[in-house]
Image: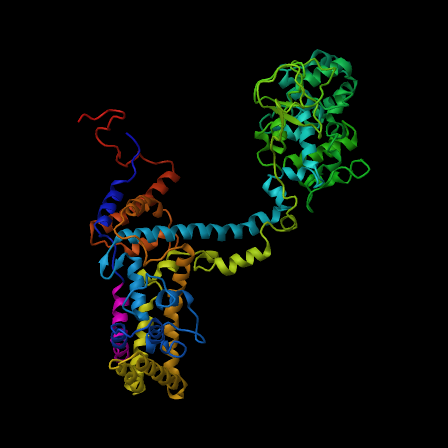
Amino acid sequence: MANGVLTPLEINAAAGLMNNQGVKSLPTALTTAIATFNGKTVIVNWLAAVNYYQAQTFKTQSTLDLLLSIGASTIPALGDAIPALPLANFPYLTQEYLPTQSDASTLDPYGFADLVQQTGNAYLGIYNDTRDLGKFCQGFMAMQGYITTTNSLINSTRNAATYLGPTFTNMSNLVSNNIASLVDDSPGALGRLATDIANQGLLTNTQTLNEYGTPAALLAQLSKVSNTINGTLPAVRDALQDQGLTLQDISNLVNINKVSLFNPSGLTPNEFDKLQKKAYPALVSITDAALQDVLDILGVTTPNVSTMADLLNPAVMFPNSYTNLLTPSPAGPVPIYQTNGAVNMNLAETVGAFLPAPSGCDELAKIIPPDQAVANKSTQAAVQQITNIPLATWPELAQTIQGFDRNPWDVNSDYLANDIVAAAPVNPNSTLQPPLAVLSPATVFYQAIDDVPAGTNINNTTYWEPITLGGLNTMTGLDQIEALTNPVAAATTNYINNSVATGSGTDGNITMCDVLGTAIDYNNLAAQFDIASAAVQTLQTAGALATLNTAYTNILVAANDAAVLTQITNANSAIATLYANPTYTATVGTLNTAWIAIATYLNKEKTYQVKAGIDYFALVSGEQNSIVAFSQMLSQYGRECQTCGPYDFLQNIADTTTLAGQAMIGSLREGENQMKLAENKLSGADIKPDPAPPVPPACGVEIAN
């Protein structure tokens, strides 16, 4: 059976939502509190004035703006207005509310209290008392998407400081998995390193880096590549035996038979190092044809290798980049070689902080020259900073740094279209067929444009074109990025913390209650409306609103726009006089505090919605595709159980008197169950019904007329 899309619970939820069932209305406490406020005499008179003016042919948008803003800068609740400076500033509310500033989605009737109720209703898919739960699903998913992406930015910024910060050296190292930290930032240093590693072929086994630079590592790799079990090449074997090593000793070396957790019967470190010390002179003695056999088997084309022991000398094996090599230190990467080409012997102690104790410098220095021991262990420490390096081969590391091809161009050979060659020489002593190119930092690679006949010069642009084979990028030339001492700049962190991480969740994470809280009256706006109603009633009872009420009722008989403007001026004057009257300072203060609190919460919601690109009064009507998508996401929402997360919010708005509402809750619980079952490896069979039709139609069948 094919994997389905919706579980049975989600299907029940989707069907109910399509039928506009399953979501509650606004909390009764909030709608009652708004109705109580709108029932106060002064607000009744103001609403009547607004409705009268809107019905007149002489109305203008600018005058309507003034009517809707009466008292905004002093006692906005008395004009059912949005608070304005100097009291407060709520640009996103005025944009939605005032006709000259808003978009076409602004709704009638006017009044800030009604705007609060209309906004909460819109969150729940209710418009002019008509439900359209497709809009609820559109808005919810859009806002949840905004929350997810924004919180990812917030948390990543925090983690960059706490998680990456202590290990950060520079951005080039960070974005290259520390590969850029292998060399200094000299121009071309990384490319020269890639060339050196490419020429080394299969010299290094990245799975045995703890033995890097030791005779045993070299012998083990030679045995592995040549497929010589428990032994080595005849010439190498003879040289080792000349130093007193037995066949068993050689087997111990090529198998790195040291005691360890997984090899308790192996040789002790001291016994093993005694064998390595005998082996090193043998490596020194291997030259000429015997050496060339070793080089050919390992695919080494590094120039100027005179003895097999040179394969353990970084100065020989990294001829183009050894003076650029770096090793990690507590203060950041430091050079392995000094400017005079000598090894920095002080690194013997430094590398100990990055390698398993003991670091091995002293032990290895008893086997190979001390400076080479320090250089090898320093190189090992650097390479092991590359995450997952044991999963890549040595050639793959080179290819990652800078693409290359070891196929040398030969004028006497023909080539197929798209073949790639290196314009580089071969080692004349090598017997490899086909031969390998001896690469240099100046090597140019070419790709065949078409089939190339033998005898065609590499500079013939009809057949050949230079090609760059890619590689790692660094931050070279990006001076501000290169100068960063922390992965995220302090200015960036400050901006995110102050301008983005403004939610009520952990570390400023934004929650569903921050963006849609009015739908469940999360911030208890009902209590603030009740406080406002009580304060207005106190002023009404004291007779402090008589002049204001007169101004409002006079608008009902205004014959022209000028008369309305006169009464608006009178209303603002009456409110200003009241605002300045010390008798009512406490009551006015209480009223303004409550009103500004309501506006603050609603403006914050609008701010997030604008940033998310969502206008709840401009969503698509009658759309149902989002309902299916929302229902399909319910099991995922059920796994997001943080306070005021999707699970928490949806539990609050689901209408459990309906099957659809209960199916929503059931789907959330189902998702939580799926998470718990998966954690303990008890996931059951797929319970989503197959979405395919009972008899799938045949494709390509012509329908008869």
Reply yes or no: does residue 45 show up in magenta: yes
Q: Can residue 486 be seen by looking at this rendering? A: yes
Tell me which residue sits at (39%, 70%) in the image.
Answer: 597
Q: Main secondary structure of the magenta part?
A: helix
Residue drawn at 23 percent across, 32 percent down: 693
Q: Nearer the viewer, residue 189 or 498?
A: 189
In this view, the residue farthest toward the right is: 340
| Rendered view: 699 above or below 663 | above
Q: Is residue 84 above or below residue 284?
A: below
Rendered image quadrant of residue 252: top right
Q: Is residue 501 left or right of residue 619?
A: right
Magenta segment includes 686: no
> Residue 355 location in percent, x, y?
66, 37
Q: Position of residue 582 (x, y in %)?
A: 40, 88
| Quadrant containing the N terminus in the rendered view | top left
Q: Is residue 647 above or below residue 451?
A: below
Which corner quadrant of the image does residue 108 belong to? bottom left
Task: Point out the stretch of residues depicted in magenta.
Answer: 27-46
Judging depth in this view, the residue of 532 and 370 nearest the camera is 532
Q: Depth check: give the residue in front, 191 or 517.
A: 191
Can residue 277 be seen by looking at this rendering?
Answer: no
How far from the left and from the top, in percent, is residue 121? 28, 61
Q: How many marks?
A: 0
Relative to residue 139, is residue 183 drawn left or right?
right
Q: Quadrant of the C terminus?
A: top left
- Please provide percent x and percent y for residue 193: 69, 33
Q: Who's the residue at 26% across and 35% down the image?
A: 691
Q: Please state if 497 lies on the left or on the right of 27 as rendered.
A: right
